[in-house]
Structure formats: structure tokens, C-alpha cells
């Protein structure tokens, strides 16, 4: 029996498995990013931040499921509001960016297992481009400002007296889904070339990233007009700036989108390890023009392709009520194996690049 236990522990170490496996705490902060003014419907300069972390053993977790009480649309998991930290140690940090029109909580199926493995996760709701607030044109088109939201969230968490002492910023990673996958890659230093994306979409209007998105439909001409408007043009002029987050050592991208906005030469010079997982049945962020392109150009990329998996399979698990209520639950492939594949790959990747917690 002892030999079996030792073998199991060794296996968990090799794959980056649970190093904590206890309760999860959740705290909410407000960060400041000046570009949020141009994206938020109320012109606020703030960013909502959620921090998930290993919590004390007596923490009382509450459901984070999304939807009406007793009849959720999406199963997410649970966390304990404002719980004490599990201990005084500093832990590696993962910044997380949701997809177009999504939320931090929608992707907690992915982030909570990272926390149970011992990481601290800092996630945001991107201004003007999330499922809780009014969507805006600025939030939809100024995707290069997303890494700035993560940087602002990290600064707020670092300054918070209850959270900051627990962050090991020498072991900093970033992850994201869809537009959040773009965000994760941009955070490593990949530069944006909006003219390249515009040319691509003019030539390929039926590509998934060029078609109006169901969460907030805008055509390419509408996006171009918005970027040329007096309100947004000054910020659009900075799209090609360096939007990297200092200290990021590794990036994990789930079904990354908007990859055609990256300068290929810049991707090829990016030395940061990047892991990419995607589905080969994804019409929203077609692999050939997104994740596979990034995997070919990035010199230190890992790639896993899941057969018959679509884009929205990477959202939180749909309940029967969710299947009946929203087209986001229309994909037919069971989500559990897809989710587990992403979690397992991320744990192994971050254990290798950041070290186990």
C-alpha cells in the first residue's frame, strides 16, 4: 500500500497535480486602467477583479454556478467569499482573461482546479466586453487593451494587504480563452498589427473571427469606422505598442482567436513558452487561421488539438436548463473530457514553466 501511495505522489509531481487540494477563497477588487474609459458604457476607468486562492481549511465555499437559484444554466464550482488564506507562503500567480463577451466566473471551471493545485488566479471582467455589463463598440474593437486590464488587476492584487503578501511574482503566468487566448499571447510581448487584421478580414469575410460575433454583432466596416472615429482613433494609434506584462514567464491559450492581428515576425521572435489547446471543429476561431498559426510561428509552442470539439465546448458545463435556454450550449460533444484535457495540460505546462506551487 505504501508503495502505491508513493507511486501516486510521484505521478502527481510529474504531471503537476494537486499540491493543495483544499478549500478555495474568492476576493473581489477594483483596479484602474485609463483605457477602460473608452470601453466601459458608463465611461468608468475601473476594472472588476476576481482573485481565487487556496483558503483555510475551515472556509465555507458557496456555489458559483451561473443562472437562476436552483436552476443554473452553467455549472462552475464553488469558493468561499473573503476566506482567510490557507497559509503564509507565497504562491505562483496565473492571470486569466475571458473570451469575447464572457466573464471571469464563466471560466472558473478552468481556474478553480489551478487554485486547488496551489496557484493564485487573478481574473478580470474586461470593460465593455463582458457578460455582466452593457457591451460597447470600444470594448469590442480595442482588444489590444485587454493585457492592460490584467496588468492593472495584478497591480491591485499586489497592493492589497490581504492578497499581496501571498503572491510569488517571480513565478507569473497568464492564460485565457478565445479573445482571452489572444490576450495571453499579447501579454508575452507579441505586437498587434491592426492593418494586417483588417486586410485579412477584407479578403476573408467569412472567417469566424471576421464575422459579426453573436455576443455583440459588428461587421468589419463598422469596426473600421469605429476605430477611425474621433473618440477611438487616438487610442487606436497605440494598438501596435508593447502591451506585454513584465514578468510573465509562460502563457496558456485556450482556442485563441484574433491571431491574424499579430505580426508574424514578432511572433517568431517571442521567446516565452506558450501552450495552446483547441478543438478541430471550431468555426468561431478556426484553428488554421488562429491557434495553428500561432503554434507554427511561436518558437516555444506546445499544441494539443481535440477532435470534434467546438469553440463553446470550452465554456462552463451546460446544465439541461442551459441547453434549453442558450445557443452557447448547442455543441454536441460532451464537455467533461474537453475540460479535463485543458486542465491537465495547463497543470503540466505551468508546473514545468513556473514550478509546482
Image (cartoon, helix red, strand yellow):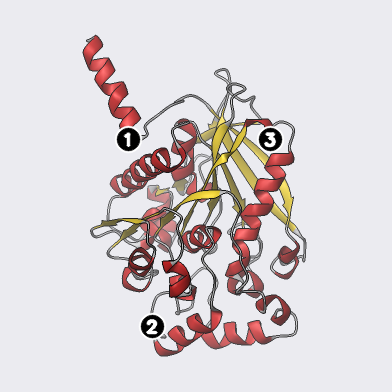
Q: Quadrant of residue 348?
A: top left
**Nearer the N terminus, badge 1 or badge 2?**
1
Q: Quadrant of the N terminus?
A: top left
State how many labels appear: 3
Q: Nearer the viewer, residue 331 or 271?
A: 271
**Nearer the N terminus, badge 2 or badge 3?**
3
- The circle drawn on residue 15 is 1
Residue 295 visible, this angle: yes
Q: Residue at x 43, y 26 (%)?
A: 19
- The circle drawn on residue 164 is 3
Instruction: Assess disc 1: are there few (<14), some (14-19) or many (≥20) residues with their C-alpha within 10 Å of its C-alpha.
Output: some
Q: Are marks 1 and 3 in contact (CB under 8 Å)?
A: no
Q: Secondary structure at mark 2?
A: loop
Q: Residue at x 59, y 21 (%)?
A: 87
- The circle drawn on residue 206 is 2
Horizontal side of 247 relative to 17 (left or right) equals right
Between circles 1 and 2, the one closer to the viewer is: 1
- 214, above or below 204, in the image: above
Q: Quadrant of residue 75?
A: top left
**Nearer the N terminus, badge 1 or badge 3?**
1
- The circle drawn on residue 335 is none
Q: Position of residue 163 (x, y in %)?
A: 67, 34
Q: CA distance from mark 2 to mark 3?
A: 45 Å
Q: Residue at x 32, y 28 (%)?
A: 12
Q: CA distance from mark 1 to mark 2?
A: 40 Å
Residue 75 visible, this angle: no
Q: Secondary structure at mark 1?
A: helix
Horizontal side of 46 relative to 180 (left or right) equals right
Instruction: Assess disc 3: are there few (<14), some (14-19) or many (≥20) residues with their C-alpha within 10 Å of its C-alpha.
Output: some
- 120, above or below 33, in the image: above
Q: Position of residue 46 (x, y in %)?
A: 74, 56
Amino acid at each position: 500500500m505504501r508503495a502505491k501511495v508513493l507511486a501516486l505522489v510521484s505521478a502527481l509531481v510529474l504531471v503537476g497535480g494537486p499540491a493543495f487540494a483544499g478549500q478555495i477563497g474568492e476576493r473581489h477588487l477594483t483596479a484602474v486602467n485609463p483605457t477602460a474609459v473608452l470601453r466601459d458604457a458608463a465611461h468608468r476607468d475601473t476594472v472588476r477583479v476576481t482573485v481565487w486562492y487556496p483558503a483555510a481549511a475551515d472556509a465555507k465555499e458557496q456555489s458559483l454556478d451561473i443562472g437562476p437559484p436552483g436552476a443554473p444554466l452553467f455549472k462552475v464550482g464553488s469558493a468561499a467569499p473573503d476566506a482567510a488564506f490557507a497559509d503564509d507562503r507565497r504562491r505562483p500567480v496565473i492571470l486569466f482573461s475571458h473570451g469575447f463577451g464572457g466573464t471571469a466566473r464563466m471560466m472558473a471551471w478552468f481556474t478553480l482546479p489551478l487554485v486547488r493545485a496551489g496557484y493564485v488566479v487573478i481574473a478580470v471582467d474586461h470593460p465593455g466586453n463582458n457578460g455582466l455589463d452593457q457591451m460597447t463598440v470600444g470594448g469590442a474593437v480595442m482588444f489590444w487593451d485587454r493585457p492592460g486590464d490584467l496588468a492593472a488587476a495584478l497591480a491591485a492584487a499586489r497592493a492589497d494587504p490581504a492578497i499581496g503578501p501571498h503572491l510569488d511574482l517571480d513565478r507569473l503566468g497568464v492564460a485565457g480563452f478565445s479573445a482571452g487566448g489572444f490576450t495571453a499571447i499579447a501579454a508575452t510581448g507579441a505586437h498587434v498589427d491592426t492593418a494586417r487584421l483588417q486586410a485579412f478580414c477584407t479578403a476573408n469575410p467569412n472567417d469566424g473571427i471576421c464575422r459579426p460575433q453573436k455576443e455583440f454583432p459588428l461587421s468589419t466596416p463598422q469596426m473600421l469606422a469605429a476605430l477611425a472615429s474621433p473618440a477611438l482613433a487616438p487610442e487606436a494609434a497605440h494598438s501596435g505598442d508593447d502591451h506585454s506584462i513584465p514578468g510573465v514567464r509562460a502563457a496558456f491559450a485556450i482556442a485563441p482567436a484574433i491571431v491574424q492581428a499579430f505580426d508574424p515576425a514578432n511572433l517568431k521572435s517571442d521567446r516565452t513558452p506558450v501552450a495552446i489547446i483547441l478543438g478541430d471543429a471550431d468555426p468561431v476561431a478556426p484553428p488554421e487561421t488562429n491557434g495553428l498559426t500561432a503554434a507554427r510561428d511561436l518558437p516555444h509552442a506546445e499544441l494539443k488539438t481535440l477532435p470534434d470539439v467546438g469553440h463553446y465546448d470550452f465554456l462552463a458545463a451546460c446544465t439541461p436548463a442551459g441547453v434549453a435556454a442558450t445557443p452557447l450550449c448547442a455543441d454536441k460533444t460532451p464537455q467533461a473530457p474537453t475540460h479535463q484535457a485543458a486542465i491537465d495540460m495547463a497543470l503540466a505546462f505551468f508546473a514545468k514553466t513556473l514550478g509546482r506551487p
